[in-house]
Amino acid sequence: MFHYSFIIRYLAIFYILFTLISCKDSFKENRDHLVFRYNEYSNTESLDPAFARNPGTIWPTNQLFNGLVQFDESLQVLPDIAKSWKISDSALRYTFTLRKDVKFHKHAQFKTKDSTRFVVAKDFVYSFNRLIDPKVASPGNWVLKYVEEYQALNDSIFEIRLKKPFPAFLGLMSMRYCSVVPKEIVEFYGPLFRSNPIGTGPFKFKLWEENVKLVLRKNELYFEKDEKGRQLPYLEAVAITFLPEKQSEFLQFAKGNLDFLNSLDASYKDELLTPTGKLRDHYKNRIKISKGPYLNSEYLGFYLDGDTKEIQSEYIRKAVNYGFDRQKMITYLKNGIGIPATSGFIPKGLPGFRNIKGYDYNPEKSRKLIQAYIQETGDTNPTIRIATDSNYQSICEFIQRELEKMGLTVLVDVMPPPTIREKKWSGELDTFRASWIADYPDAENFLSPFYSKNHTPNGPNYTHFKNDTFDQLYEESFLITDTKTREEHYIKMDSIIVANAPIVPLYYDQVTQFIHKNVKGMTTNPQNHLVLKRVWKEKRK
């Protein structure tokens, strides 16, 4: 009898456990379409928008916080918490009228009946004060460098006065650095606000096990609605993992455990894509590829204040520009990802880009320019040295092989990225491979590296390029309020860069996403910011 009852109890416990496990699996199967999953291999350092300096922090804080304005996929400025704004004729005063229906995520420290409150203009005053507070030490304090003062005129009017006109100012206000945060919550947590974020975004914070996983849940108080009047977001949750290896990330994606990949890594590019950038047959039924312009120009830079006579010679700089096939480079080394940079430095996808004539592949011109240099200097063995990191070694070695056919000796030095950054700032590299990714979507951001007053170490002019006409146009552009007229100035400046060849534009990068076909509503944008409030998932069949 004893043994019989023991067996009955054992079977009962087994049945309960089996039922619980089955229910859990059933729940996962039935609810998985409500959760968006991705991996952040570079990790997330903070969930405080004041420290949103890289994608690992920008992406999750983009779901948690809002600012005054936002951009759409075409880089048009749209309202966010500010429903409208006015810019004075002098372009020095910006007056924002705030929405009155924006609430912070719930938290007991609000000490209200519903544990939340509405955003008011003084919240932006506090948030901006915090951004420039030396004790906070935000890396984003530079976004307010053109600001003279700001104030809350009342609960719904926030005014900003600039020191001088800056046409790209609205773009700066869209950055996650400028998100609104609640004083009472920030002061309650202090430095721990980084892991206890309270914002206004479409998702709210749920759980963060650092280096393991991050979970965000739908914000039931979110103020934005879609075109049919339905409240955003559509998803119930966002789940983020932190696998540090790109190959592991790809395997999880291939198994269906991640909903998308944001880039093409060398470790799996040939497994996923053909040399011409098409999906392999094995993945066509499950995965779609989405491409779009990315505000990133890849280039070689020449340091013009050095002693190397080859670098000082416009003949050699132009010979390098003409001496290799950019399309061939993209096809065989990038699997078709990227646009050959045969125009200027301003990338495709940015207002101010125009197909001005740059440098295409012309081996005959390249050889003639090298011969002209030899005849002028008597140097029969012209040589340049390119510094790069290992990620771009194959590209630089391709350029090396092509230029040696033209009669130019090229040495490739592979260095760690921090070493290259340090040596670029100190002017120790004759030629270096670099990327320029826009901080804000205005072409001025791509022209500032060529303004003479920005010579390193005082600014980002790594090449030490100097041209009086360029400087004049650059300074004039700040005073032009008409967008089209300002863009014409940008195009003229870009043409001057091409004519003087302080750089070798390689390619304009592309946002490249690999997405499971049951994911809907996902779009790319030229800043490569993850926007999930309009994304939904169909149940897998």
Image: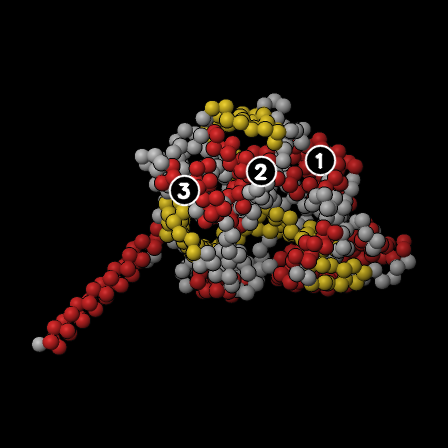
Q: Earlier in the sequence, mark 2 or mark 3?
A: 2
Q: Residue at 40% of width from left, 37% of height from top? A: 104
Q: How is the image coloured?
A: secondary structure
Q: Nearer the viewer, mark 2 or mark 3?
A: 2
Q: Position of residue 129 (x, y in %)?
A: 54, 35
| Residue at position x 53%, y 43% in the image | 50
Find residue 26 and report its horizontal and vertical position in percent: 27, 59
The answer to whether residue 127 of the structure is visible from this angle is yes
Give the quarter of the figure containing the N terminus.
bottom left
- Residue 484 in sight: no
Whether pointer 3 and pointer 1 mark residues with C-beta atoms closer than 8 Å, the reply is no
Q: Amino acid at mark 2?
A: Ile
194 left or right, relative to 138: left
Identity, as a three-letter code, of the amino acid under mark 1: Tyr
Mark closer to the chain start, 1 or 2: 2
Res 474 label:
1
CA gap between label 1 and label 2 equals 27 Å
The reply to whether the C-beta atoms of the residues labelled 2 and 3 are less than 8 Å apart is no
What residue appears at the point 55 percent right and 42 percent down from the top-left corner?
136
Query: Which of the pair 519/127 is nearer the observer?
Result: 127
Q: Nearer the viewer, mark 3 or mark 1?
A: 3
| Secondary structure of residue under mark 1 | helix
Mark 3–mark 1 distance (CA, rounded to whole Å): 39 Å
Q: Depth check: 88 or 346 in front?
A: 88
Which residue position is annotated with label 2? 132
Q: Residues within 10 Å of mark 1 (few under 14, many from 20)?
A: many
Q: Position of residue 322 (x, y in %)?
A: 74, 54
Look at the numbered disc 2 and give the secondary structure of its residue. Answer: loop
Task: Report the Cα–Cα distance between label 2 and label 3.
Answer: 26 Å
Q: Identify the residue under disc 3.
A: 202
